[in-house]
Image: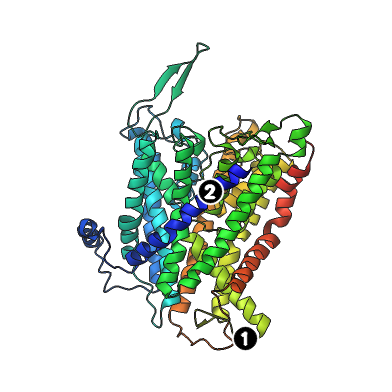
Amino acid sequence: MVQGYVQIAIFFAVVLAVVKPLGIYMAKVFRGERVFLTPVLGPVERGAYKVLRVRPEEEGQDWKQYAKSLIVFSLLFWVLLYLILRTQGLDPWNPRGFHSAPWDVTFNTVSSFVTNTNWQYYGGEVTLSYFAQMAGLAVQNFVSAAVGIAVLVALIRGLAARSGRSLGNFWQDVVRILLYVLVPIAVVGALVLASQGVIENLSGYTVIHTLSGGTQVLGQGPVASQEAIKLLGTNGGGFFNVNSAFPFENPSGFTNVVEMFLILIIPASLTYTYGRMIGSQRQGWAIFAAMAVLLIAGTVVAYVAEQHGTPAQHLAGLHTHAMDGSTGGNMEGKEQRFGIASSALFTAVTTATSTGAVNNAFESLTGIGGAVPFSNLGFSEVIFGGVGSGLYSMLLYAILAVFIGGLMVGRTPEYLGKKIGAREIKLVALGVLVTPLTVLLSAGLAAAAPAGTRSLYAGFTPQGFSETLYAYLSQANNNGSAWAGYTGFLQPHGPGNVGAYGISFTDLLGGLVLIAGRFLPILFVLAVAGALAGKKVSPAGLGTMRTDNPTFVFLLLGIVVLVGALTFFPAILLGPVVQGLSTRLF
């Protein structure tokens, strides 16, 4: 196991080395300052403002205007993507002649990609044309990621403002995020992946003859370009059905590290950007420390659990030899080219960052190992989380921690010198609780409704319960990874066409959960930003609670764990924990 821990430690060290330089660069971009790409991209930026008829220097927006622009922008892209997917039979670059998926699957897919989730009830290589993948899904990977970062920037401006109501201009923020952050890094990432064997072409599918005399069809397509942004933007949807476990998406141990690196660099670096923009780097490092502790803890738990297997596996003789030579490791559902350490690390990183790309089968994890992605999602996307969305969610918890700390010592709570009043804490509480409430209501409805239970593969077992809960945890938290037994599969048609009803229920409920899990928290975050923007900053006194030291980090961790545990711990006990302690294979 030592070798695995060394790999994990080196990976985190490399990510840490990038946090400061990338964080400084993004702070300059968000402030509208000149960067090294300005001479090349400046004319493109100015052209975009002319097309949008926006004068960002003169048109600051309050939180309601900012939210309105964001909703209009997202709605337009929802309609555009729906049209692209529903007219797929007319698309160019459609070598397999794919037709459009059913309307309910399309509704779920469009809602998924617009909300930066990329939950998929279909296999990409047997469903979508190259045009739909490029002009539809890949484009949405860029713009949905930009929306998340823009909301964070607006919140930071609200925290840093000394007076006034402006949170900046949404259109300027999105344009600069796309041009100066997402597109350049994605291009570099795509070139690196393509150089290592990730395919990038518009060729027809390849038919090969197997040794047994049969034939097999291998999908092709523009994969590297979409792979880079799906990871960088913490989107996660796979070009192929098995996602980053497929060699055409993730061919080697090196590309596996590169892909995890792309997932983490923006969410991790945004903590430094935050400290830079509010004028206190210690504040940024405090948030980073809290996130890092939770991520490292989850990684270690997953690695230890997968190395030791479960009682059921040992009784059934399914224990294996792990890649580092130790016995008892659980290699089921994992790729030999990655091994247990890299698979456990990928599992923790992709669920902590709301990415959802997977390089191993989550349903094959041990019970305790499977509790890690459950727990990461149960913390409501605050362990680095999605690009932008992770940090703005954690900042809500920071404000909540300050409020609780103020109650404990009998002082008016302040964060960054701004007093937290009743209105702000109500908005924060709603922003923190809306996602867990969405998960529990939707999972309960799916478990109780006959149309929902038809999507269960494992039936009414701990595994079946895990499938249901994880599906709505993933969709509400805009993650997109899946416990594969829970599907939108169209069951055989029976009396009353129950099969079609079953898939419609799953797709429609999931689509509504996706939208609610994305945009309701965003509205509360922007409302908090607007409420704080106009508050004056009070000078720190002897009794002011510091929010940049280890004591606050400990308090913040406690609040995150407490809220997550009170909300989801009983449900996790009924699913993966029971399965992990059982001697029965489900």
Identified at 26% across, 61% down, the residue is: 52
- Residue nearest the observer in this picture, 95 or 252: 252
Point 63% across, 71% down: residue: 555
**Can residue 505 be seen from the camera position used here?**
no
Helix, strand or loop at mark 1: loop
Q: In this view, does 14 lie above or below 548?
A: above
- The three-letter code of the residue at mark 2 reads Thr
Q: Which of marks 2 and 1 is nearer the N terminus?
A: 2
Q: Distance between the residues labelled 2 and 1?
A: 39 Å
Three-letter amino acid code of the residue under disc 1: Arg
Q: In this view, does 56 lie to the left or right of 119?
A: left
User: In this image, 482 relative to 248: left or right?
Assistant: right
Residue 121 in picture, x, y percent from top left: 52, 39
Q: Residue at x 37, y 65 (%)?
A: 24
Residue corresponding to mark 2: 350
How many C-alpha atoms fall within 10 Å of the one at disc 1: few (<14), some, or many (≥20)?
A: few
Q: Residue at x 74, y 42 (%)?
A: 579
Q: Position of residue 48 (x, y in %)?
A: 24, 58
Pick whichever, 150 or 299, lies toward us.
299
Give the x, y percent position of residue 221: 37, 33
Asked if one can make out residue 440 in the rendered structure from this viewpoint, the answer is: yes
Please tell me whether residue 527 is drawn above or below residue 341 in the rendered image: below
Looking at the rendered structure, the secondary structure element under dot 2 is helix
Residue 403 left/right relative to 478: right
Q: Quadrant of the N terminus?
A: top right
Instruction: Identify residue for label 1.
Output: 411
